[in-house]
């Protein structure tokens, strides 16, 4: 009996502690943008705890905490001519734009850690670090990248069926 409890406890605890919402949208955009759904779930949890109305003190909005300027740039590149900043409160659009942006960063840097560092600290900072041959300079960003890796593993383990894994 003790072994059974040890084997099952982490999954139910993880599901209780780390919710998953919008899984159909996550899985759909993960497929569309060639991303791992557990990565998207991890970023959304870390950024907003799945709160579609989340707003940060820096002005980031929605599930994936996109800045309105980033949203405008993505809209310009993807044909969203009627886009407005409040659209970032829409879960489907926020996840779609966040997925597009994450794919862009992965393509640009060719490395998940650097892409996540750019998502957190901005591309200009990552470009500067790379130009000087440095690693991630900001402690907060190093912690962010490590935390996303932990959450990604946890979401893959706890929600494999929901994420199509």
Image: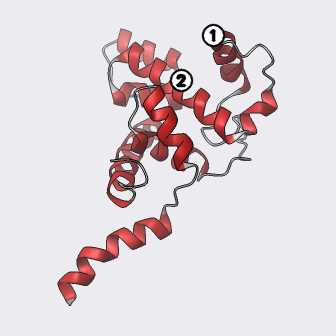
Per the image, label 2 sits on a secondary structure element best described as: helix
Q: Residue 122: percent from the left, percent from the top?
A: 54, 23
Quadrant location of residue 114?
A: top left
Label 1 near label 2: C-beta < 8 Å?
yes
Per the image, label 1 sits on a secondary structure element best described as: helix
Relative to 111, say whether 141 is above or below. Answer: below
Kindly identify the residue that appears in the image at 35 percent across and 50 percent down: 150
How many discs mark residues in the rendered view? 2
Kindly identify the residue that appears in the image at 51 percent across and 28 percent down: 119
Relative to 72, say whether 17 is above or below. Answer: below
Which tag, 2 or 1, sits closer to the chain's start? 1
Q: Is residue 39 left or right of residue 20?
A: left
Residue labelled with disc 1:
77
Q: Is residue 85 left or right of residue 60?
A: right
Residue labelled with disc 2:
100
Kindly identify the residue that appears in the image at 64 percent across and 17 percent down: 74
Relative to 139, say whether 97 is above or below. Answer: above
Crowding near pointer 1: few (<14 within 10 Å), some, many (20+)?
A: few
Quadrant location of residue 115?
A: top left
Q: Residue 1: percent from the left, percent from the top?
A: 20, 90
Measure the alpha-carbon separation of dots 2 and 1: 10 Å
Crowding near pointer 2: few (<14 within 10 Å), some, many (20+)?
A: many
**144 vs 68, nearest the viewer:** 68
Query: Disc number at residue 15?
Result: none
Kindly identify the residue that appears in the image at 71 percent across and 37 percent down: 61
**122 vs 109, nearest the viewer:** 109
């Amino acid at each position: 009996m003790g072994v059974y409890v040890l084997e099952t406890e982490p999954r139910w605890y993880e599901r209780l502690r780390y919710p998953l919402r919008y899984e159909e949208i996550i899985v759909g955009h993960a497929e569309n943008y060639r991303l791992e759904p557990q990565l998207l779930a991890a970023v959304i949890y870390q950024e907003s705890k799945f709160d579609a109305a989340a707003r940060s003190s820096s002005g980031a909005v929605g599930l994936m905490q996109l800045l309105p300027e980033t949203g405008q740039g993505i809209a310009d590149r993807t044909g969203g001519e009627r886009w407005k900043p409040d659209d970032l409160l829409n879960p489907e659009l926020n996840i779609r734009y966040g997925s597009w942006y994450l794919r862009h960063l992965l393509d640009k840097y060719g490395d998940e850690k650097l892409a996540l560092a750019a998502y957190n600290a901005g591309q200009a900072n990552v470009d500067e670090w790379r130009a000087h041959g440095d690693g991630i300079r900001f402690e907060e960003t190093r912690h962010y990248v490590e935390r996303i890796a932990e959450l990604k593993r946890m979401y893959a383990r706890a929600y494999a069926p929901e994420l199509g894994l």
